[in-house]
Amino acid sequence: MTQVAIGTCVATLAILFNRGVRYGTVIDLGCADGHFCLQYFALGLFPGSTCVNVDANALYEPSLREIKEVLGGHYVIAAVSDHDGESALNVWSHPYWASAADPASWGGSTEQPAETIKLRSLTLDTLVRELSLKPPFLLKLDLQYGELAALRGAEKTLAETDAVVCETPIEEFPSVCEFLGKHNLALLDVTELARRDDGTLYQFYPVFLNRRLDHLKSRDVCGTPAQQSALVAQMEQRRDAILKSNAIVLGQLRAKLRQ
């Protein structure tokens, strides 16, 4: 597989792949043009998996139809939430900016949707049942503040889910962790950090792993004896640099205090 950077979602899923994790079905909620399933399948991370792309925005249907023709699997144009029935898709100034989530959740913006479209809403449990999808599942969610609602509609599916990748605004991270923790999914990694103009973190993609796979987590922080020796050498070099820096700063402060 092509080398990928640590700290990215693909790197974390590659680590799980190399440790033997395989999925019966990969479900991408809020898939847009379907690049997640397509690219990761091409990288060899989803061998034998059925790919299911779901998005509320019909703008993406031509792309999703073409992916289905090549990879098989399914695509669904619908909103995934905590209920079956009907939802409103709020579309702002461009069709790309569309979400079935409450407009008030979009960063406190007071902008009103340019258009509201009614469409089918279903739970993830309903989707899995209707398409007869086979576990174990990998769930990927990118629902513009609608992630928790979708997870609430996945009680049965989460019981058979091995991994979850969930776009998470920083303010929703505690709630997402708490909810998934109650369903036996523990935080494994934090990837794809995105920052505001002022440099502060605003969202990222945490990866959760089912606790039944805890045996796959590395417990070895320091590594082999050779790696441990290298780590000690790095720590010694770092401390030496810190002491030299401290001496310079202390000298400067003493000089100022004597003035």
Image (cartoon, grey):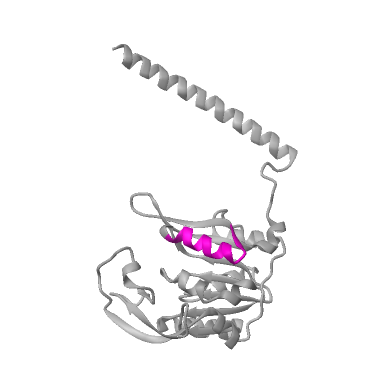
Q: Judge whether residue 137 can be spotted in this image.
A: no
Quarter of the rendering occupied by the N terminus? bottom right
**Image coords of residue 155 (percent x, y):** 57, 75
Task: Looking at the picture, tell me which residue is in the foreground, 2 or 44.
Answer: 44
Residue 49 falls in which quadrant of the image? bottom right
Residue 149 shows in the view: yes
At x 57%, y 66%, the residue is: 164
- As drawn, the residue found furthest toward the right would be 225
139 shown above or below 194: below
Depicted 110 relative to depicted 199: above or below: below
Tell me if 1 is positioned left or right of 85 in this view: right
Residue drawn at 68 percent across, 55 percent down: 217
Instruction: Tell me which residue sits at (47%, 59%) in the image.
Output: 173
For residue 185, side relative to residue 144 (left or right): right
Residue in the foreground of this view, choosing between 169 and 47: 169
Query: In the rendered view, would you say 221 is above or below 159?
Result: above
The answer to which image quadrant residue 41 occupies is bottom right
154 in magenta: no
Q: Position of residue 144 (x, y in %)?
A: 41, 69
Q: Residue furthest front?
A: 182
* Residue range highlighted in magenta: 172-187
Residue 112, given in percent of the width and then of the height, sits at 25, 74
Q: In the rendered image, which quarter contains the C terminus?
A: top left
Q: Quadrant of residue 251?
A: top left
In x, y percent, where is residue 116? 31, 82
Q: Main secondary structure of the magenta part?
A: helix
Residue in the image at 43% along x and 20% along y: 248
Does 183 lie within the magenta span?
A: yes
How many numbered discs? 0
